[in-house]
Amino acid sequence: MSQETEPKGSVAALLRYWRSLAGGAAPQRSDIDPAAIKLLLPYLYIVRYETGPFRVRYVLTGTETDRWNGFSLTGRYIDEFLSADKYGANRHLLGCYIRAYETGAPVFGTYDWPTRAGTMLEVRFGMFPLRVGESIAQCLAIEDYSGFPPAIAADGIPFEDPAKAAPNSN
């Protein structure tokens, strides 16, 4: 896991779009035009920051992010996945979401994640804070899965949804 200084691929494309909206400052959430980033939509997440206590909630996830995760994260909180995260990727992502929230600036990085066959993949990501009114309240994020050999990409990510493993409380 690392921080990147120069984003590449779809992360760089989303950075260019984000910067075009408010000259490098965090734009308003309402400034985002899905039609302008149509090719990126399958790889995007929109998260909402909640305070008291601080939490990061996925409010919208793209079709490719859902496929790579094996289920939709929409409506879930990133902290739900921390206890089952053997590789530290979700903890790293949470730290980066916090940094984007606190600074109002984009955050880029990578994390390693295994396929079902055990091959480690380096996933690139970018997080772009968004304002609602005067406050940073949301974040537009992207994961770039490009460059993986087709056989590996088809192998998928072996993450089990912790909610499935939990006993039913009803």
Image: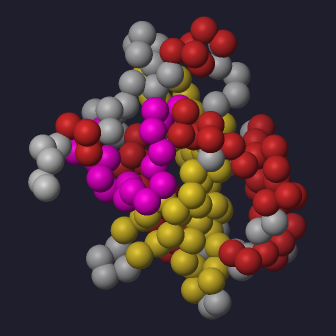
Left/right of residue 90 with respect to residue 4 in the rendered view: left
Q: Which residues are magenta?
A: 68-85
Q: Which of the 4 quarters of the picture holds residue 166?
A: top left
Whether residue 19 is visible here, answered yes or no, is no
Colour option used:
secondary structure
Left/right of residue 96 with respect to residue 61 in the rendered view: left
Q: Which of the 4 quarters of the picture holds residue 55?
A: bottom left
Q: How many marks?
A: 0
Assess whether residue 133 is covered by the magenta stretch.
Answer: no
Residue at position x 41%, y 40% in the image: 89
Is 11 located above or below residue 67 in the figure? below
- The rendered magenta stretch, by its main secondary structure, is classed as loop
Q: Nearer the viewer, residue 106 or 57?
A: 57
Whether residue 18 is visible here, answered yes or no, is yes
Residue at position x 45%, y 39% in the image: 71
Is 12 located above or below residue 157 in the figure? below
Assess whether residue 78 is covered by the magenta stretch.
Answer: yes
User: x%, y% of residue 40?
Assistant: 76, 46
Q: Which of the 4 quarters of the picture holds residue 115?
A: top left
Image quadrant in which the C terminus is located: bottom left
